[in-house]
Image (cartoon, rainbow, N blue to C red):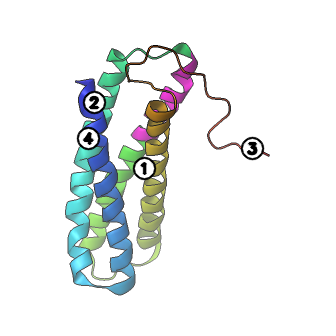
């Protein structure tokens, strides 16, 4: 079932990204068309994120991962779990905000911070996953073991 993971992650990335961006546009413009998209997009994105985590954990068990990449895989896993948790919290907070006409204060700013965190973690998770496949060949059938990562992903190269 590890073949399903690379398919499902694209839906999670697209739906959550578009949902958060659509809500940002709605918050600025108050255009009801964007507001109507937010909860369905976030809900579908969360569903696909959960499926992506489940299939990713399954893939981790079934795919041979060279020892030198275990830290990279662990970072991807943690990032995916934080993204999914952030997506759940984003959806819940947005649903609560929808019950109020004009939410103010800590709820509004808390929601915005959680949504930005979720979007940042979503992109970080995708970047780590993309590196594993396209840079290091993890989960692909290759005849040789790729070189280990030379530096931390977020370290300065100065």
Q: Is residue 121 visible?
A: yes
Residue farthest toward the right in the current orientation of the protein:
158
Which residue in the structure is indicated by mark 3? 157
Q: Marks 3 and 1, how far apart in space?
A: 24 Å
Mark 2–mark 3 CB contact (< 8 Å): no
- Residue 146 in percent (x, y) is at 54, 21
* Secondary structure category for the residue under label 4: helix
| Precedes in sequence: disc 4 or disc 3 | 4
- Residue 56 in percent (x, y) is at 33, 30
Q: From the image, give the main secondary structure of the stretch colored magenta.
A: helix
- Residue 156 in percent (x, y) is at 73, 46
Could you tell me which quadrant the N terminus lies in?
top left
Q: Quadrant of residue 151?
A: top right
* Secondary structure category for the residue under label 3: loop
Which residue in the structure is indicated by mark 4? 8
Question: In front of the other: label 3 or label 1?
Answer: 3
| Precedes in sequence: disc 2 or disc 3 | 2
Which residue in the structure is indicated by mark 2? 55
- Residue 46 in percent (x, y) is at 27, 49
Q: Image height check: is 116 above or below 139?
A: below
* Secondary structure category for the residue under label 2: helix
| Precedes in sequence: disc 2 or disc 4 | 4
Residue 73: in magenta span:
yes
């Amino acid at each position: 079932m590890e073949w399903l993971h690379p398919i499902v992650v694209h839906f999670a990335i697209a739906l959550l990204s578009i949902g958060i961006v659509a809500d940002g546009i709605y918050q600025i413009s108050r255009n009801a068309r964007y507001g109507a998209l937010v909860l369905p997009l976030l809900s579908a994105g969360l569903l696909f994120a959960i499926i992506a985590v489940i299939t990713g954990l399954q893939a981790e068990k079934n795919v041979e991962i060279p020892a030198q990449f275990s830290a990279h895989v662990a970072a991807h896993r943690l990032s995916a779990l934080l993204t999914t948790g952030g997506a759940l919290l984003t959806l819940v907070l947005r649903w609560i905000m929808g019950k109020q006409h004009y939410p103010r204060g800590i709820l509004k700013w808390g929601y915005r911070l959680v949504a930005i965190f979720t979007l940042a973690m979503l992109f970080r998770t995708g970047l780590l996953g993309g590196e594993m496949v396209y840079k290091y060949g993890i989960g692909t059938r290759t005849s040789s073991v790729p070189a280990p990562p030379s530096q931390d992903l977020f370290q300065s190269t100065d």
